[in-house]
Amino acid sequence: MKEFIIGIDAGTTGIRTFCFDNKGKVISMAYEEFKQIYPKPGWVEHNAEEIWTKTEKLITSAIRKGKLKPTNAVAIGITNQRETTVVFDRKTGKPIHNAIVWQCRRTSEFCTDLKKQGLESEFRNRTGLVLDAYFSGTKIHWILNHVKNAKEKAEEGNLFFGTIDTWLLYKLSNGKSHATDHTNASRTLIYNIVDKKWDSDLLKILGIPNSMLPEVHPSRFSFGKTQGVKGLPDGIPITSLVGDQQGALFGQLCTEPGEAKNTYGTGCFLLFNTGENFLISKNGLITTLACGPEGNTVYALEGSVFIGGAVVQWLRDNMKFFKKSADTQKIAQSLKKEDEVVFVPAFAGLGAPHWDMDARGAIYGLTRDTTPEQITRAALKSIALQSYDLVHAMEQDTNQPLKVLKVDGGATSNDYLMQYQADILGKKVIRPENIDTTVLGAAFLAGLEVKFYSSVNELKKLTKKYKEYSPKMKEEIRKQELSRWHSAVVKTKTT
């Protein structure tokens, strides 16, 4: 029986588990969505116990689908939604509150207060991040100050914090490992990415005890071993943890300075590898940590769109415009005429390069004859238009025009969206054969650590197939589309 790597992709709306062979090919995959919890407008939570239960179940399911032996799993790699925050009891291992999701805006007012205190540059220069409710630090602060006895327990050293990678590692190792990697730590607003350590000054500002925090290691590292996991033998090494977008960057093998990718998932995330250069953006981007050629830690610029593919999910689940997300391609392609409908999906505020926490979604250009099909097409366009803004900001910061845009993620299977992305950028768009590069990056890192894969050069030889989209839109039309979009964004912004 063949050996394989287990890749766990703990996303925002569901869990995917994969089994990869020594050629980097998917042998099998299992997937389930989990519940999205909305206690108040703008608030988003997950049940961390549900995430773990489904992960454990899906590992067994993927192995069974691949007709593999659990004993032949050589390593586990985990990639995850990054800033989502879990606080759990050190003694019982039970969460003391639902996980607060990266999309959640409940700490927006607190972030505004910190800005008024003149602390934004302090956080920016140490963490590379802007003061925004997106990141973990203010979410931890909220839990400590709103859950009964949480502050006291934390000060007594009885609470642990983790992003979802830390939570899954803790559960897979039966509580033996409480750790994270540089990429996830760099998204917390309390990790100093210059010194590569938890920042005591920022922890003091947010009232977070150091005892809550996990150990931090490079993304490729021996983090622990399985113990007591249903369907798996004890002792399988867990050898990579990596934030989903940095996982995709590595999965696309953008390991050298000047290489970039854009991932289209629940949100959209553009990362540009800057190597050893710690660059502070002047155009609304953030600085983060990523993986170099052999999994070593490097810097990257990142632009984040909060609502990418999630706008399609909203039209499907809330508006009932269609039954399956895949239907949107035919819907958009069925329209023969252009219109002036513009959809700004600021359901959770606007991310980069605008950073307007209080903006909310809006649709412009509606007339009496506007159809669900037109709104659906405008929603797809909004994903590409938001990504255009990221690319434009990235080019301004680096003074390097992107020749091509490498893309990945579930929404890239939509040919209409990808062609429109190439059109609106005026650049070639390249989609790899395996669009799940987020988890592929985690598998590559895990495999390199246990020598299942020999080197990045070997991996590059294994990932040569791709589809290319070239721009076809007339320049006059492109300018009109961008003008309508930017006019709509200005109307939507509150600042």
Image (cartoon, helix red, strand yellow):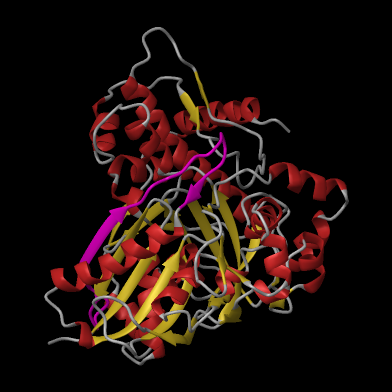
In the image, residue 199 above or below residue 136: below
* Viewport quadrant of the N terminus: bottom left
In the image, residue 317 above or below residue 428: above
User: In terms of depth relative to the viewer, which is nearer, 295 or 153?
Assistant: 153
* Viewport quadrant of the C terminus: top right
Q: Is 33 one of the magenta-colored residues?
A: yes
| Quarter occupied by residue 239 | bottom left
The answer to whether residue 232 is visible is: yes
Q: Residue pushed farthest top?
A: 368
User: In terms of depth relative to the viewer, which is nearer, 427 or 384?
Assistant: 384
User: In terms of depth relative to the viewer, which is nearer, 458 or 442?
Assistant: 442
Identify the residue shown where x is 28% and y is 22%.
Answer: 336
Identify the residue shown where x is 38% and y is 47%.
Answer: 35
In the image, residue 487 above or below residue 433: above
Report the number of discs: 0
Q: Is residue 388 left or right of residue 438?
A: right
**Residue 99's x, y, as percent?**
52, 55
The answer to whether residue 294 is visible is: no
| Quarter occupied by residue 286 | bottom right
**Residue 162's x, y, as percent?**
56, 68
Q: Residue pushed farthest right?
A: 117
User: In terms of depth relative to the viewer, which is nearer, 206 or 484?
Assistant: 206
Magenta residues? Answer: 20-46
Identify the residue shown where x is 45% and y is 76%.
Answer: 169
In the image, residue 336 above or below residue 460: above
**Residue 25's x, y, as percent?**
23, 73
**Residue 381's x, y, as percent?**
42, 35
Q: Is 338 one of the magenta-colored residues?
A: no
